[in-house]
Image (tube, grey):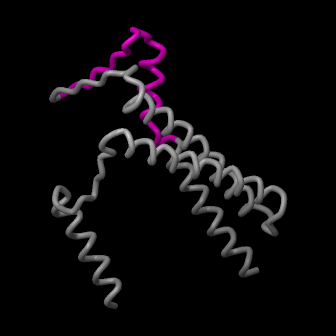
């Protein structure tokens, strides 16, 4: 009961006071984004290894194996996307994003409309992340039902 109460209180503090609870972290300086990018690269290779392991060695069969491999695929694609977007946002200087009350203006330093569209659609990373988490849920749920049989 104590653990549940502390988790609830922590979540409540984060929701009510996000500016003082440090729930959002800016990367700050070049070392922050480099370490963050290395984390994405490590995660990407770990997912590739897990996908290969699921294909070749693991004892899972049927839907659970398929769902988990689809989850790995979507998370690999998501990591590629996020790595590219972090590079465009914070490292390359190729994209300039300005905001006002109602609009967001995306401009390429080289006036490349292709790069602007790539950035625009790349920032919609939830299109890859949500299916990945859905397939992860379905895969884990399938393992539970397969083990019960």
36 on left or right of 131: left
Nearer to the camera, 31 or 130: 31
Q: Position of residue 63 (x, y in %)?
A: 74, 61
* 16 relative to 113 in the view: left or right: left
Q: Residue furthest bottom?
A: 1
Question: Which of the pair 145/46 is nearer the observer?
Answer: 46
- In the figure, 142 relative to 91: above or below? below
Query: How far from the left and from the top, in percent, is residue 108?
Result: 38, 15
Would you say residue 31 sits in the magenta stretch? no
Quadrant of res 3: bottom left
Q: Quadrant of the N terminus?
A: bottom left
Q: Is residue 107 left or right of residue 138?
A: left
Q: Residue at x 72, y 81 (%)?
A: 148
- Residue 72 percent coordinates (x, y): 64, 52
115 is higher (above) or lower (below) than 70: above
Residue at 62 percent of width and 69 percent of height: 141
Percent of width and height locating residue 13: 20, 69
Horizontally, is 17 left or right of 58 in the view?
Answer: left
Q: Please identify the residue farthest to the front as the structure is shown.
A: 31
Viewer-proximal residue among 29 and 39: 29
Q: Is residue 99 above or below residue 65?
A: above
Q: Residue at x 54, y 55 (%)?
A: 133
Q: Quadrant of residue 79?
A: top right
Q: What segment is highlighted magenta in the picture? A: 102-127
* The C terminus lies in quadrant: bottom right
| Residue 140 figure quarter | bottom right
């Amino acid at each position: 009961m104590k653990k549940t109460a502390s988790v609830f209180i922590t979540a409540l503090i984060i929701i009510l006071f996000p500016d003082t609870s440090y729930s959002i972290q800016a990367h700050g300086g070049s070392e922050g984004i480099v370490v963050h990018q290395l984390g994405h690269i490590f995660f990407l290779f770990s997912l590739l290894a897990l996908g290969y392991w699921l294909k070749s060695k693991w004892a899972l069969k049927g839907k659970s194996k398929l769902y988990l491999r689809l989850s790995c695929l979507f998370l690999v694609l998501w990591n590629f996307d996020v790595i590219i977007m972090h590079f465009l946002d914070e490292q390359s200087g190729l994209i300039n994003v300005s905001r006002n009350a109602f609009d967001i203006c995306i401009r390429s330093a080289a006036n490349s409309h292709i790069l602007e569209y790539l950035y625009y659609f790349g920032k919609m990373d939830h299109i890859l992340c949500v299916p990945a988490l859905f397939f992860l849920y379905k895969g884990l749920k399938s393992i539970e039902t397969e083990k019960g049989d």
